[in-house]
Image (spheres, rainbow, N blue to C red):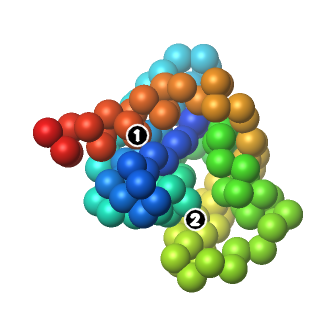
Amino acid sequence: MSHLDIYIDGASKGNPGHSGIGVVICSEGKTIKNISSYIGEATNNVAEYTALIYALEEALLLKAKTLKINTDSQLLARQLNKIYRVKHEGIINLYNQAVQLLTGFEKVLICFIPREKNQRADELATDAIKKALK
């Protein structure tokens, strides 16, 4: 698989609170993998970065060369596109881990998209929390 389109989202019930991540991986317009995972107590920003890390690890396993990462987290998009610096101690390590994983690809585009265009990833993140709390 040379190119993947990936949608990521993190959800948090409370901030911090019970959190989950959702990842939708697409190739040539078709969904090839959904990831929904409960990550315990975290802030929303930690959940967003955790979703990114899960997505990047999966893309490496799928041997992708180029990625388009779609996120509705303006903060994450701006930090990874080097518009904002990462100052918060809780996400510096996650940011550094993500940057390290990004080196495994020839080209990565990080795009900020409206929430309405990220509904499936949001559902997966929210479902992970609901299942964990049952």
Q: Is there any visible trace of residue 13 in the rendered image?
A: yes
Give how far apart the Cα atoms at labels 1 and 2 are: 19 Å
The single residue placed furthest to the right in the displayed view is 83
Three-letter code for the amino acid on which mark 1 is drawn? Ala
Residue ID at (42%, 29%): 123
In this orientation, which residue lies closer to the viewer: 48 or 28?
48
Residue ID at (54%, 26%): 119
30 relative to 130 in the view: left or right: right
- Residue 125 has which mark? 1
In this orientation, which residue lies closer to the viewer: 128 or 82?
128
- Rendered position, 31 above or below 57: above
Write down the residue under mark 2: 98
Indicate the position of residue 108 as horizontal and vertical percent values.
72, 49
In this orientation, which residue lies closer to the viewer: 108 or 46?
46
Disc nearest the viewer among 1 and 2: 1
**Quarter of the N terminus within the rendering:** top right
Three-letter code for the amino acid on which mark 2 is drawn? Ala
How dense is the environment of label 1, judged by Cα within 10 Å: few (below 14), some, or many (20 and up)? many
Indicate the position of residue 131 as horizontal and vertical percent values.
21, 38
Indicate the position of residue 125 as horizontal and vertical percent values.
40, 40
- Rendered position, 81 above or below 114: below
Q: In which quarter of the image is residue 111?
A: top right
